[in-house]
Image (cartoon, grey):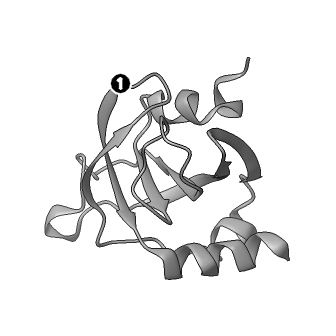
C-alpha cells in the first residue's frame, strides 16, 4: 500500500505537517472525523519555525481523510499551488496527541477546528 493512501502512513511520514481535524484524533474508536493534513515544504531559513520572521510555512500538498465506523478513506489530495492557496493555514496549531489505528500515540502539530474543517470541505467540493 502506498503510504499516502492510509492515514497512518501519512501521519508517520517524516515531513513536517499541520493537522486540522473536526474532532480529537483517536483512530482506534469509531468516532466520525474529517481530517486534513497540510504537508509543509521545508524552506531555507525556516530553521524549524518562523522565529524572528525568517522562513515561512509553505504548504506543498493537502490530503484529506474522512473517518467513519473505524475506517478512514482518503477523500481529497492536491499538490497544485492554485488549489492549496485556497486553504487557510492554522497558525494557532499546537502540539496535540493523537492515537493511530494501531493504538500507538504520537504527537503532531495541529488543531481541532470544526469551522475550519467546514471551510476546507467547501473548497474540496469545488
Is 49 on the left or on the right of 90, as rendered?
left
Residue at the location (24% across, 62% down)? 50
Is 111 on the left or on the right of 54, as rendered?
right
Circle 1 packing at 10 Å, graded few (<14), some (14-19), many (20+), is few
Residue at the location (77% across, 52% down)? 75
Which quadrant would residue 64 be assigned to in this image? Answer: bottom right
Element at badge 1?
loop
Residue marked by disc 1: 104
Q: Position of residue 100 (x, y in %)?
A: 44, 32
Furthest-left residue in view? 52
Using the image as rendered, state which of residue 54 and residue 83 is in the foreground.
83
Q: Position of residue 19 (x, y in %)?
A: 44, 55
Is 16 on the left or on the right of 116, as rendered?
left
Furthest-top residue in view? 1
Q: Position of residue 124 (x, y in %)?
A: 77, 69
Q: Is residue 14 above or below residue 77?
A: above
Q: Position of residue 95 (x, y in %)?
A: 23, 52
Quadrant of the image for the N terminus? top right
Amino acid at each position: 500500500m502506498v503510504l499516502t493512501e492510509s492515514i497512518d502512513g501519512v501521519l508517520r511520514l517524516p515531513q513536517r505537517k499541520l493537522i486540522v481535524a473536526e474532532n480529537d484524533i483517536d483512530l482506534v474508536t469509531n468516532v466520525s472525523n474529517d481530517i486534513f493534513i497540510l504537508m509543509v515544504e521545508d524552506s531555507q531559513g525556516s530553521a524549524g519555525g518562523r522565529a524572528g520572521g525568517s522562513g515561512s510555512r509553505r504548504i506543498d500538498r493537502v490530503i484529506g481523510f474522512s473517518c467513519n465506523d473505524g475506517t478512514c478513506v482518503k477523500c481529497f489530495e492536491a499538490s497544485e499551488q492554485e488549489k492549496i492557496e485556497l486553504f487557510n493555514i492554522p497558525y494557532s496549531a499546537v502540539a496535540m496527541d493523537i492515537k493511530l489505528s494501531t493504538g500507538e500515540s504520537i504527537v503532531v502539530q495541529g488543531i481541532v477546528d470544526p469551522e475550519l474543517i467546514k471551510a476546507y470541505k467547501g473548497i474540496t467540493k469545488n
